[in-house]
Image: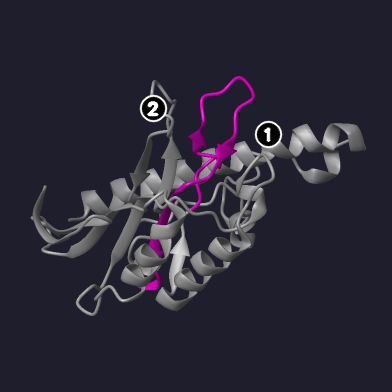
Amino acid sequence: MFDGAITHVNSYAVTVNFTSRLNNKSFHVSNIYGPSNPSQKQGFVTWLMNFDTTEFDDWILGGDFNLIRVPENRNKLGDDSTEMYMFNELLSDLDLVEIPFSGRELTWNNMQSDPLLVKLDWVFTSSTWTLTYPATHVQPLSRPTSDHIPYVIHIGSDIPKSKLFRFENYWVEHPGFLDNVTPLEQLTSLCKCSPELILQAQACKSWVKKMEQRHLQFEQAHI
């Protein structure tokens, strides 16, 4: 589905340019590994801040940054405010957008009986990415043996349809509409109203679907 070409490699990251064979659109993915040694973190941040992304339109980067953003990224005290400030300044300077993990935030476990849990793994994107692939989300998986949880990045360009029910006023003018729903004035009690309205919404959806199918059959018959 994609052609890939490595565009950059060093001790901190591997960056690959992916090009779709379907529509020739391309994007860059950087797999990050930040050093755990505090004395080396400044070098990592300086490198990333000066990383040349001028040719990147859509860019996603994720991995083990070995940095946290706020004290709540740990379940115990011991955060380094200097490192947090440095990390947040980096994200601001690069204009990166965080893609949160769905349902699970703390991604690293020191594997002790009273474990230290820390969010060391992050996924960020460029601001243009959020417009091109608005349905991107991160799904954490179960942790088998590693001290880091694995995760999957789902990339999507379609915005999910809303599940909200919307009533269209012109429906009541259509012949046959009232034959499929119960007039609201016949709802006899407040306690009955909520489940009745749910049934009415379902009836409206079913009626609209039938009308759309009839309209499609009519158009096909006249092609």
Q: How many residues crowd around disc 2 within 10 Å: few (fewer than 14), some, or many (20 or more)?
A: few
Taking depth in this image into account, of 131 and 127 the one nearest to the observer is: 127
Q: Is residue 134 above or below residue 1?
A: below
Query: Which part of the image, by quadrant, shows the C terminus?
Result: bottom left
- The residue tagged 2 is 146
Magenta-colored span: 100-128
Q: Is residue 179 visible?
A: no
Residue at 29%, 46% (x, y): give it: 217
Q: Seen in the image, is 39 located left or right of residue 70?
A: left
- The residue tagged 1 is 199
Residue at 60%, 48% (x, y): give it: 73
Query: Residue flagged by tag 2: what amino acid is it?
Result: Ser
Q: What kind of element bears circle 1?
A: helix
Q: Is residue 96 above or below residue 171?
A: below
Q: Nearer the viewer, mark 2 or mark 1?
A: 2
Residue at 62%, 44% (x, y): give it: 74
